[in-house]
Image: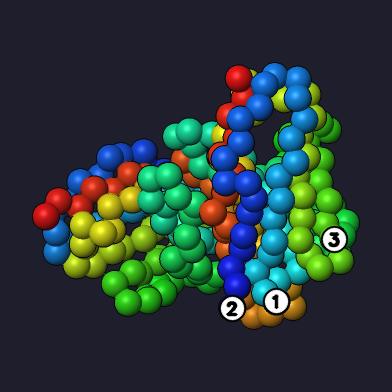
Amino acid sequence: QKEVEQNSGPLSVPEGAIASLNCTYSDRGSQSFFWYRQYSGKSPELIMSIYSNGDKEDGRFTAQLNKASQYVSLLIRDSQPSDSATYLCAVKRNYKLTFGKGTLLTVNP
Amino acid sequence: ETGVTQSPTHLIKTRGQQVTLRCSSQSGHNTVSWYQQALGQGPQFIFQYYREEENGRGNFPPRFSGLQFPNYSSELNVNALELDDSALYLCASSPVLAENYNEQFFGPGTRLTVL
């Protein structure tokens, strides 16, 4: 079992729709959870961090964490073409940040 | 506030050579982590430096080594380059002793090609 799993996609949504990105992790000792956005040819950019169960909202982004189910998700409301990128889920325990392979999101105008 | 910077941007080496990549951490950050990202994959943790000491290491061989300097900048050295070392090398810095101490912020990366 991979440490952090994501659907590789591509996930395609129309402009204005809600994009839902999912991630599961295997280490129950994981302490912190992150979503990064990576445009093609660029480095990852931190967009959300979440540390406790429940929802965390920041603008159009909502992160959800369920530690019992070892599940993290990211919702993007009112998706824009500029949201088209690879979204990386990352899980941290102590010093180590472990990434999934990422989900490619395409928002169609 | 100055973000994380890395140099060089691109680098081409041949098998067996050695390479040094450099990173300057974001202002106020004293922890630096290095990652390798192969094409189509997520970043893989190489190691982390805090107070000039290696604070943790991923599954990378000893030919991957690093340094952190008193100003918190860092170097990644790779000896005896192999073709599979071709990747984007990312440096990330994070603050310690802050509410958001867990967050890591990435530099632009160095694209290494080994021929």
Q: Which residue in the structure is indicated by mark 2?
A: B1
Q: Which residue in the structure is indicated by mark 3?
A: B69
Amino acid carrying label 1: it is Gly
- Quadrant showing the N terminus of chain B: bottom right
Dot 3 or dot 2: first in sequence order is: 2
Q: Residue B99: horizontal and vertical position, in percent? A: 64, 80
Amino acid carrying label 2: it is Glu
Task: Classify residue A47 as left or right of residue B103.
Answer: left
Q: Is label 2 in contact with label 1 (beta carbons under 8 Å)?
A: yes
The image quarter containing residue A73 is bottom left
Badge 3 crowding class, 10 Å Cα cut-off, few under 14, some 14 to 19, many 20 or more, is some
- Badge number at residue A50: none
Q: Do labels 2 and 1 share a chain?
A: yes
Q: Which residue in the structure is indicated by mark 1?
A: B28
Where disc 2 sits, the SS reads loop
Subunit under mark 1: B
- Judge by depth and name the residue closer to the eye, A89 or A3: A89
- Quadrant showing the C terminus of chain B: top right
